[in-house]
């Protein structure tokens, strides 16, 4: 998942209600993301899928 870097934008598969998230930090498989509607969340990418998001084109 080379797109996972601080400042990048992602969405969490299966939780579209959380909205767009901005990556705060990446340490191994642990990614801290600040989501629009869920706040700051620690995501383990071994258990959940983060999808790259293009901020110029909203995707739902």
Image: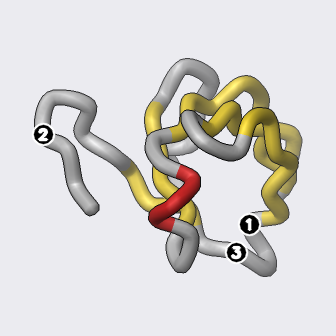
Q: Is residue 10 above or below residue 43?
A: above
Whole-percent x and y of residue 21?
Answer: 54, 38
The kind of secondary structure element at disc 3 is: loop
Please tell me in which quadrant of the rendered image residue 57 appears: top left
Q: Quadrant of the C terminus?
A: bottom left
Q: Of the residues tagged 3 and 2, which is closer to the observer?
A: 2
Q: How many marks?
A: 3
Residue ID at (47%, 48%): 19
- Residue marked by disc 3: 48
Q: In terms of depth relative to the viewer, which is nearer, 13 or 38?
A: 38
**Distance from the alpha carbon under mark 3 to that under mark 2:** 23 Å
- Residue marked by disc 2: 57
Coloring applied to the structure: secondary structure
Q: Residue furthest left?
A: 57
In this picture, residue 44 sits left or right of residue 51: right
Q: Is residue 17 above or below residue 49?
A: above
Packing grade of label 3 (10 A; few <14, some 14-19, many >=20) is few
The reply to whether discs 3 and 1 touch (Cβ–Cβ < 8 Å) is yes
The kind of secondary structure element at disc 2 is: loop
- Residue marked by disc 1: 45
Whole-percent x and y of residue 7?
Answer: 54, 19
């Amino acid at each position: 998942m080379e797109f996972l870097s601080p400042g990048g934008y992602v969405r969490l598969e299966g939780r579209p209600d959380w909205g767009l998230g901005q990556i705060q930090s990446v340490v191994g498989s642990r990614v801290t993301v600040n989501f629009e509607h869920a706040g700051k969340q620690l995501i383990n990418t071994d258990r959940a899928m983060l999808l790259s998001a293009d901020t110029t084109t909203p995707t739902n």
